[in-house]
Image (cartoon, rainbow, N blue to C red):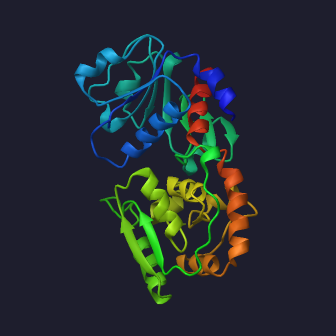
Amino acid sequence: MSEADFHKQIKKFNKVVIWGLRTKKHTHRYIHHHFYVTLKKLGTTVAWVDDKEGNASVLAPNDLVISVDLTSVHLPIKDSVYYCLHNCSDDIHAKIDPSRNIRLQVYTNPAEQASEKWDEVTLFDKKTRTLFQPWATNLLPDEFKKPISKPKSNTVIWVGSIWNNELDQGNINEIQALKYVLKKRNIKFVNLKLLPDSIHTQMIRYSRIAPAIAGRWQAENNYLPCRMWKNISYGQLGVSNVKKFESVFQGCSIGGDTIEELIDNTLSIAPDKYRDMVLEQQEIVKKHTFIERLTNIMTAFEHI
């Protein structure tokens, strides 16, 4: 989707309000931050506020609100406002005019049951007014970094969380396996967190390779981690144990039945071929930026 097309659609709304996580630390804050920064780059009128009762006055008629369940305690529901809400309860959705109400979900296997398929990982279910799409890279297409290959580096940098929960949905076991594989090949694993976007980009470009290893639950359900799109836009080859990426990056993906195979196959690629594959992947990721994610949200309102 071009910026021109985006601007045509955004005119429907008075402004965009990103509701929640303006100052609170949370992993989902990065999603809100990327929505906000992208809108600012595109010259769109946007406000980003914390989930506080006193911020209700920010909402004006024909605003578009983007929010998430964990920051919806004080979310005001107004008849003249459009809402795109991620993981929010049915109780909240019941208060919103259906013609102004979109449910937002990430892509996983159940999304394939949706009534409309817009692309390989974007689907819309008209009956439930649910838009399924993964998150994206925070860079715009003209900001993508030049492909890089670091065959002499002995470090792999992982920017982000290593975690688990009571449902065993985290990545802690898979990252442990990744560390073990890298250690056998004399490559050091370094975990960094809470980095500014510019430093995040630099660290990924410094890394020997940049695998987007997902936890077992994520891999089995084809959850598509945003680090895959980001790492490619930062100039590294996208490598993941989530099989759905093989169909997204058909012809320029790295396969492997185990994490060890995946890493060995990646490390064996010659520098020139590595950079060429990054270029191929970047052409695909240009269709997976927050411009597309925002445009899909606006298009969803036209489909209900």
Q: Is residue 152 above or below residue 69?
A: below
Q: Is residue 154 above or below residue 5?
A: below
Residue shown at the point (47%, 89%) measured from the top left: 184
Residue shown at the point (28%, 38%) measured from the top left: 23
- Residue extending furthest right? 251
Q: Is residue 8 above or below residue 234?
A: above
Which quadrant does the N terminus fall into?
top right
Residue 272 placement, left or right of 129: right
Residue 241 quadrant = bottom right
Q: Nearer the viewer, residue 2 or 288?
A: 2
Residue shown at the point (35%, 36%) measured from the top left: 69
Q: Is residue 188 above or below residue 198?
A: below
Please provide percent x and percent y for residue 235. 60, 61
Which quadrant does the C terminus fall into?
top right
Residue 172 in view here: no
Count of number-bearing discs: 0
Q: Nearer the viewer, residue 66 or 104?
A: 66
Please provide percent x and percent y for residue 259. 53, 76
Please provide percent x and percent y for residue 71. 31, 34
Residue 146 in view here: yes
Please provide percent x and percent y for residue 201. 49, 57
